[in-house]
Amino acid sequence: MSDAPRDQRAPELDELELELLDAAEEAELSEALRAAFAPHEIDPRVHERLLEAALEDPLAPPSAEELVESERLRRALDGAGEHADLALARALKAAHAPNAPKRAKLELAAGALKSPSRNVIFVRFGAAFGAVAAAALVLLSLHASRRPEAAEPANLLAAAPDLQTLAQSRSTAGLFANAASAGEPSTRIDRIASLRERELRENRYALWGVR
Amino acid sequence: MKPKWSALFACCLLFAACSRDQSNGLERCAAVDAGTPVDPLLLAFLSRARAAHHLADEHEAAGDLNAAIAPLVELVAGPLPHTGNELAPEVNEVLADTRARLADLRSRMGTYDLAFADAEAGLEHATEPNYFRGHLLETEGLVEERRAKSLEKSDAGAAARARAHAIELLEQAMSVQARVIDKSGAPSSPAAVPASSASARSVNSAR
């Protein structure tokens, strides 16, 4: 996620070297910040691909490394220690639920936005994720008010599906109507487990309102 | 779009997706866990069963039947997901299938009493005339057949009784599997039905 080596301290916002954005980068940054702050409905197929990419195995327990890293990140977020993903986490939090910006930063960024050359803050990806938060604060401060759907993200969800419409626990005997092709015991449990794994995933998507 | 901006945009989208309604989602998952839809507990059991059978495969392939039995015993004696006081159909069926495999492995080791106990325990999980019940009856018949062979030299009478019992069990297995196939709606092909199957059907239909 970050270019910064693990354990290297993430730079504070004030320490970042801010460079100018070109028009295309400015547009992309604005769109990314707008999407994070006030997400709109995305194509269900795209959403599904994102979820599948993120939840390859929804039932997999966290690995030992993940547990250690999550604890380190939690401590870093509490102000104890550093973590390579700390800046990213803070940037995303700031983009989604920004605090009021400091006046000096607001003036600095507002000045850049008013420039004839359309100079806006350029932030480096990787270790400079914190700067995204700063840009988010500036852009968001210019909004007169939050969009209604952003204020109530629950409205974006589809109505909860009837539980009876979800895949139900049921006999698997129908999978083995032909005893001759039922295969070995491990082949049978493979088929049963694979089918139910898929159905559990479908159920979760339905509950999340993406189906 | 440059890779770094693609990654940032993807992060933002994913973050937005994850934050759409976290608490609501958790409540709904709890609701699902308490009902009959396919739920994580069922999957946990199936995952355990899958691992147990594949472990047994490895040991069986290596010729170590004792080691092959161990994970299967752990599975049937281990925690089971209940819906109220009942087991889900899949759980019953996997337990029945696992008991059938245990019976087969134990009989190959010559421990026939344990093998029959597994077969009978399996039949309690497969009370409907489906593939799993038929497979258990077939396995129990094969166990009895092996026992008959083992008794041939020492006790010819017991061997004959065991062989007769094996035939009875195997005919029951054929009857159950014939009903399974009939229920599936598969087109029948009289010319392709072996004489033994046809006679088995007539025997069982007379019962």
Image (tube, grey):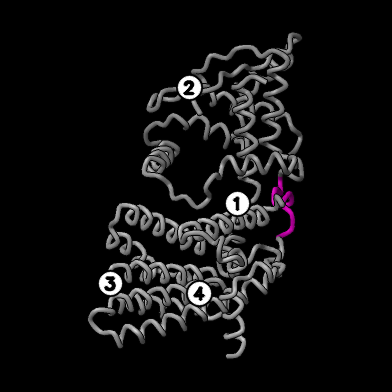
Q: Is residue B76 visible?
A: yes
CA distance for labels 4 and 3: 31 Å
Disc 2 residue type (three-letter) = Asp
Q: Quadrant of residue B4?
A: top right
Magenta residues? A151-160
Q: What residue would you read off at disc 3? A: B110
Viewer-side residue, A192 vs A53:
A192
Q: What residue would you read off at disc 4? A: B87
Q: What residue would you read off at disc 1? A: B22
Rendered location of residue A152, percent (x, y): 71, 49
Viewer-side residue, A106 vs A177:
A177
Note whether A121 is above or below B71 in the view shown.
Answer: above
CA distance for labels 4 and 2: 50 Å
Chain containing the residue with disc 4: B
- Label placed on residue A3: 2
**Residue at 34% from the left image edge and 61% from the top image edge:** B71
